[in-house]
Image: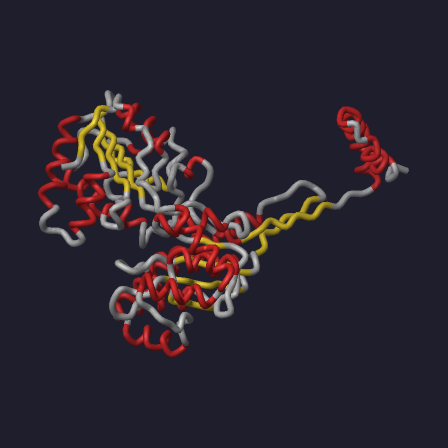
Amino acid sequence: MMQILSGDDPSVLGERRPAGPDPSAVRDIVRDVRERGDEALLEYEKRFSGHAGPLRVSPGEIRRAYREVQPEVLDAIRDMASLLRDAEQSLLDSLNGAPAPPGISRAFRPIPSVGCYVPGGRARYPSSAVMSVVPASVAGVGRIVVVTPPPDSGFDAATVVAADHCGAHEIYWTGGAQAVAALAYGTATIPGVDKIVGPGGAVVTAAKGMVSADVPVDMEAGPTELGIVADGAADPDMVALDLISQAEHSPDTICFMLTDSEALARRVADAVESRLDTIGRSDIVRESLYKNGFLAVFGDVRSAVSAAERLAPEHLEVLTGDPERDAAPLNSPGLILLGSETPSAASDYMLGSNHILPTGRQGRLRGPLSVLDYTKMRVTARADHSRMADILDRVGAVTRVEGLHNHYEAVRGRVP
């Protein structure tokens, strides 16, 4: 059963992240692919997934994917992409349309190339292809590369269709640390990219961290985290459904509820327990919730909200009588979901928000993946003699403090 803790228990705010992979093993894979390229990449792919190549998804496979994907799935992918595309285009337009001070010009320009990691293997994530490729396409990235692990069985038509429909230029069957290394350093088959984005498990997250000294990455985006702040009036069945929905991602998922009601905590624990023998992926859900999950009881909702701010989970649901008011102090979660009718599972697909979110408390420093991750700000500045005369005295004051007299002379030389 899920553990019920007091909000005063130090473990509530303690380090709860599952132990990651052996860093030396991940480092060896990254180094090997960097040094031997395709030869190592194919060796690791065959060892870990059984896929012996070819790596690149061919035009024939893309056509096959469109034939095989069910019409309702294709419609859902198109709708998901359209909602996200509208949101990202609105953000980009607002950035480029924002007024600048006199003499300053700002424009957000796309980076040249990006590698989008789309998880796969035991599960399939066409939605993650949408979430990473659409912002890149809206930003105007010239080369969008998707890598995804070959499925354990069958043919992952939906992910191929999602990547292609949203604007990917290249799609490859490869995953794990070897795929991250290939994107970072390039091989004969997969030329390197300028940035790597996308969610993944512990191995992928570790590999992204290792290559980040050489190639920029977006963020630590995994394993999944869900926090819920709920008052005593919250529906325990809805809370249980939401905890289970995110726990099914992997045994490393961290799901928790913070509440002012011990009675609710007991009812949620019972509601979760009553479902575990009948749901899909029950072994994953059970391991995740028993090993990493918890229900914490605080003296009041304000204290629960304060704890949520410190924990900074990837997703945070606020299920209280006045979610707008109670969520007002929150800034650190990756995505804040307000009210009982806004489950995190919906935001994973069809709310127009991006589900690639910061984990590991990185939400304190950044938000969801967006066009901002695929652009750089181009700034130009222009002045004239009168502007130089206007700023001369202030430049002089600062340069004297800094001891950089020639900076002052360079400005003074422009003053008639």
Q: Is residue 273 left or right of residue 338?
A: left
The percent position of residue 205, horizontal first and vertical second, equals 40, 48
In the displayed structure, 283 sits above or below 327; it is below
In the displayed structure, 350 sits above or below 145; it is above
Question: Which color scheme is applied?
Answer: secondary structure
Q: Is residue 256 visible to us here?
A: yes
The percent position of residue 330, horizontal first and vertical second, equals 38, 32
The residue depicted at 84 percent of the width and 34 percent of the height is: 406
Give the quadrant of the N terminus: top left
Name the quadrant containing residue 259.
top left
Nearer to the camera, 158 or 36? 36
Q: Residue furthest bottom?
A: 60
Circle count: 0
The percent position of residue 261, horizontal first and vertical second, equals 18, 26
Name the quadrant containing residue 255.
top left
The residue depicted at 13 percent of the width and 51 percent of the height is: 279
Q: Is residue 19 left or right of residue 299?
A: right
Q: Is residue 85 visible to us here?
A: no
The residue depicted at 79 percent of the width and 38 percent of the height is: 387
Q: Is residue 115 left or right of residue 63?
A: right
In the displayed structure, 268 sits above or below 107; it is above
Q: Residue furthest right?
A: 416
The percent position of residue 4, horizontal first and vertical second, equals 18, 30
Give the quadrant of the C terminus: top right
In the displayed structure, 222 sits above or below 392; it is below
